[in-house]
Image (spheres, rainbow, N blue to C red):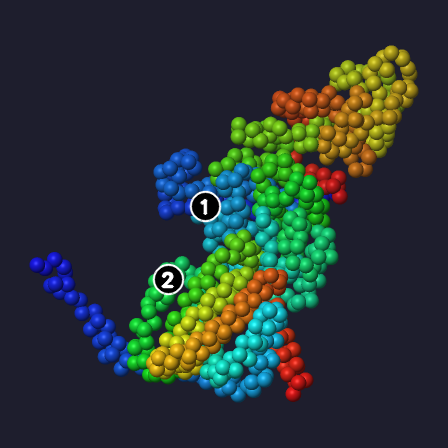
Amino acid sequence: MADQISDYYTLPLDDWIEFFVKDWLVPNFRPAFRAVQWPIDQVLSGLEDFLLWLPYPVFVVVVPLIAWRVAGRGVAGFTLLSLLFLDLLGIWRETMVTLAMIVTAVTFCVIVGVPLGILAARSDRFYSFIRPILDIMQTIPPFVYLVPIVMLFGVGIVPGVIATIIFALPPVIRLTNLGIRQVQAELVEAGLAFGSTRRQLLFEIQIPLALRTIMAGLNQTLMLSLSMVVIAALIGAGGLGLTVFTGLGRLDVGRASLGGIGIVLLAIMLDRITQALGEGGRSKASGQKDTLTRLFKGLVQGSKAYNKKS
Amino acid sequence: MGDDTDLTAGTEEKIRVEHLFKIFGADPQDTIRRIRDGASKEQIYAETASVAAVSDVSFSVNQGEIFVVMGLSGSGKSTLIRCINRLIEPTEGRILLDGEDIVGMDVEGLRRLRLNKLSMVFQHFALFPHKTVGENVEYGLKIRGLSARERREKAVRALEQVGLAAYTDVPPDNLSGGMQQRVGLARGLAVDPEIMLMDEPFSALDPLIRRDMQDELLALQQQLHMTIIFITHDLHEALRIGDRIAIMKDGRFVQMGTPEEIVANPADDYVSAFTRDVDRSRVFRAHLLRRDAHALSPDTAIETALERFESLGREALYVVDGHGRPLGVVRRHDLERAGQTILQDSLIDDFPSAQESQELIELYTACAKGLPVALVDDDGHLDGVIDPLEVFQILGGGSDVSVEEGNTSVQSGKPGRSTIHTGTLETRRTDHG
């Protein structure tokens, strides 16, 4: 009564993939993957050490000041209250570990994603090559690639960050590509007509005009990487994800909720601040320079304010 | 304006385009073959889905000339101008700038050319919204690698030329359309281009501003003597600005000539549809109707003078002094009636005069006196006369035949006069300045 192909034959794709990963990729390329791990490890541990070293009062003063400069009074107030509340809940340390993780992940997403996005915007062929890969990255459940990641990178916080990077990378590539492609054709023509090289065209015209879209992509990447925090905890990443994960394991609703609240507050703070950064890029005439000076002024004022207090 | 500058402006060939084709489609060579076999743009599109945006266009532009390409949307004029700085790659043909073929030039050579020789002004201004007005104008200089101070100086000078120096640090979005295009013009001028490509620069502006901008361009050109290719869909604009005009349709040049030639002798129905409602009195200039003066000297005997009237068949003749300056005009019937002995007594010294470059409309009042109008050159010498009847004939009837007659009569007097040299514009500009 066979009326399906699988009654006669099933493709052993699972075996093939297992063979490919276990017996070919892991033994042959483990050192290469380990090498990739190194810079991420450096940035992550540096950042984590810094954030944990930073005295709590400094953080609570400086970050709301930055938020105030960049995004206005409302966001600054919210940031201040959130930071106080997070400490009140006793999850400050976890919050800092998670912050270090996502900042690292987002940094590498930008380092990899923006150039890929630019490349995709310049070459239709490259874009049609990278598009299905981005589709896969965005739709495949992260659990599927957790196992090979563990095989290649081991367990711990760095593999967790790598999984986060894979998950959160696509928006920054897509929106960089989109932003550059959306720059008005006449403006690109004007740039070319005056004799710009491709590099000058890129840095003088295309990137500044695409900045708002690129920042929107960055914001998306940030949010996605926050949503990976718990999953990354499955392979040994610490922080708030671990709090949720252990709470889940022990059916400790309270503990899991603490982690959840921490993630949500962190998400809202980062989202508002980065969104304001992106909008600053457009509303003012002189783009990224302006945003950067505002950010810098915020830092300077923040540190001055701290110096006065101490 | 001296004659010698006119001559140099008129003779040195700056841009030469030979048999230029631009085909958008799968098999351009096949399309070019079809065009050479005489297929029309529609036929080609129907049969091959290829678009012949520019087909077999040839022309040359002299140093200091304003060459206007006029056509409706889809005629290929924007594609044509973009071929000249290769923002669009031509499919076939040659484009020579100062004798150097730029088709097939490598990327670096092309970049240097755009950097140093060419400049462009765009229809929708194409100002960079993330830069201030000053930074926009500086752009071409910045990518040339000039120091910040040097390029700011040049940018401010260019902005002064268009009267916007006060807006240097303002973002361009804060300016009105007309002001934005002035910035676009300043950006083009800042790099001291030899060749300026203007793609419908004033089409997006409202009519009054457009007229101001045209005047301003002509005034600037009078100082700068750039070679300009100017695209427009407005024949009136073309006639006002152009030293020569090409009418473009379906990727081809239908007619090429001076404004007067185009209005006087439209090549086909397509062109005459445009020229029909053109105000001829503003296109034609006095020199078109010029006749030889056959002036008398003050001591001519009455009898000799009357013989001259007879043989020339004229009703009035001018009297000039020893330097050829007009003293006045004598009418035939005055001489016959009075039976005077010397010419001086019938001399009318309140005579109408005009200059060769004046538009016919400016001759109305002069013609109203019924006397022939004296054409006087810059030094006050009598250079010819105009019969007021001919002026009214052209302006009133507007028939092409009368223009033809005017032309022939002129030609018989002084061959070569009917072709209008670039020089005419130079003198015309003094009116604007």
Marking on residue A131: 2
Indicate whether A232 appears above or below A219: below
Q: Residue at x 68, y 65 (%)?
A: B150
x then y, percent, for residue B178? 66, 48
Q: Nearer the viewer, residue B395 or B94?
A: B395
The answer as to whether the residues below labels 1 and 2 share one chain is no
Q: Residue at x 43, y 70 (%)?
A: A224
Q: Nearer the viewer, residue B263 or A56?
A: A56
Give the residue type at disc 2: Arg
The quadrant of the picture occupied by the C terminus of chain A is: bottom right
Say whether residue B339 is left or right of residue A214: right
Secondary structure at badge 2 equals helix
x then y, percent, for residue B267? 54, 29
Q: Quadrant of residue A258?
A: bottom left
Q: Quadrant of residue B186?
A: bottom right
Q: Nearer the viewer, residue B126 or B221?
A: B126
Q: Quadrant of residue A3?
A: bottom left
Q: Work out how far the residue at label 1 is from the one at label 2, CA to CA, in angstroms.
A: 32 Å
On the question of residue A25 being in view, the answer is yes
Give the residue type at disc 1: Lys
For disc 1, the marked residue is B22
Indicate whether A67 appears above or below B336: below
